[in-house]
Amino acid sequence: MTNENPVRVLSLGAASGIAQATARLYAAEAAIIGVAGRNAARLAAIADDLQARGATRVERFEVDFTAVAAAPELDRMINQLGGIDHVILAYGLLGEHAAAERDAAAAQSIIDVNFRSAAAWALAAADVLERQGRGTLVVLGSVAGDRGRRSNYIYGAAKAGLATLVEGISHRFAGTGPRAVIVKPGPTDTAMTAAMNKGGPLWAAPETVAAIVRKAADRGGPVVYAPARWRLIMAIIRCIPAAIFNKMNF
Ligand SMILES: NC(=O)c1ccc[n+]([C@@H]2O[C@H](COP(=O)([O-])OP(=O)(O)OC[C@H]3O[C@@H](n4cnc5c(N)ncnc54)[C@H](OP(=O)(O)O)[C@@H]3O)[C@@H](O)[C@H]2O)c1
């Protein structure tokens, strides 16, 4: 497939299961794709896969998102892509919650990856999109951010902060050209959840979430649940009184 005017997309955290499935959708549209992550060998394999699936061009960027200044790195990536239409911020760290409750460095790392650095990259992307007056920032949040619960509230808190930040960027953009969307997946079958018991109606395939991410880059938002049923589920969970919620073990 050739494309006269290919979409230019940058995937931050391109080795994530959801990001890879999303990038494959862009490849099928003959997009120009930037894949950014910290493992050079995996980026090379992903780039080959996307090229074979029809991408017009794939650029690789080896980066640890917590270790660099976001704005200049982002500018460098976008220059290499020749411009930008969509930025997908997908990287994240679930971490070991039980350990992180007792280990300040482990807790800090979860907050650092999922909030501090993600916020810096989202704000840098917002500036680029605002300057050019168009384009979309799609950020992967989580339903875990909608209500703190004992099994993952450190990760959840970081994702809640990120969701508020992206909603704010969306508000900042209102009435102008660019858009910002926070996509909140429920449990999804990727490396992040490799240690969990999977299966059952609440689990989604990364391809299912990817289709929602791809659509969110074109329209909708500012808050999108993936799959959509999680909007109702989380609305109900948020309404459960503490006296009942505290007796639930999840
Ligand atoms: N899977 C789920 O059930 C689920 C549910 C809700 C929300 N989400 C969110 O959706 C997004 C994608 O999730 P996923 O399940 O597709 O994730 P995944 O497959 O576990 O991939 C996460 C990616 O983030 C990268 N990463 C983490 N810290 C990084 C850093 N400092 N610099 C560079 N890369 C870094 C990892 O790189 P390495 O491979 O080098 O470690 C990995 O490729 C995440 O934001 C996640 O929090 C996932």
Image (cartoon, helix red, strand yellow):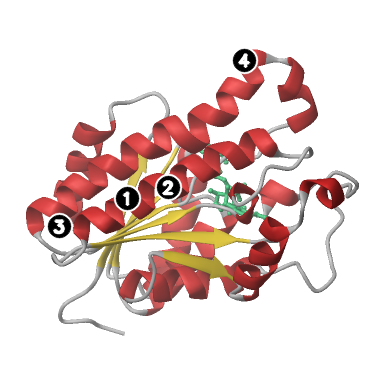
The residue that mark 2 highlights is: 164
| Amino acid type assigned to the residue bearing label 2 in the image | Thr
Asked if the residues shown at circle 2 and circle 1 are in contact, with their CB atoms under 8 angstroms apart, the answer is yes
Q: Are marks 2 and 4 in contact (CB under 8 Å)?
A: no
Mark 4 touching mark 3, by CB under 8 A?
A: no
Q: Which residue is mark 4?
A: 105
Quadrant location of residue 27?
bottom left
Q: CA distance from mark 2 to mark 1?
A: 6 Å
Residue at left 31%, top 85%? 1
- Mark closer to the chain start, 4 or 3: 3
Residue farthest toward the bottom in the current orientation of the protein: 1
Type of residue at label 4?
Ala
**N-term mark: 4 or 1:** 4
SS label for mark 2 = helix
Q: Can residue 13 be seen from the camera position used here?
A: no
Q: Secondary structure at mark 3?
A: loop
CA distance for labels 2 and 4: 24 Å
Tell me the tag on residue 83: 3
Visible in this render: residue 125?
Answer: yes
Q: Can you tell which of label 1 and label 3 is closer to the viewer?
A: 1
Q: What label sits on residue 168 in the rendered view? A: 1
Q: Residues within 10 Å of mark 3 (few under 14, many from 20)?
A: some
Q: Earlier in the sequence, mark 1 or mark 3?
A: 3
For label 2, count other residues whose C-alpha is less than 10 Å away and answer few (under 14), some (14-19) or many (20+): some
**Of marks 2 and 3, which one's residue comes earlier in the chain?**
3
Q: Report the mark closest to the observer, 2 or 3.
A: 2
Tell me where residue 234 appears, x and y as whole percent. 66, 62
Q: Position of residue 224 (x, y in %)?
A: 48, 67
Helix, strand or loop status at disc 1? helix
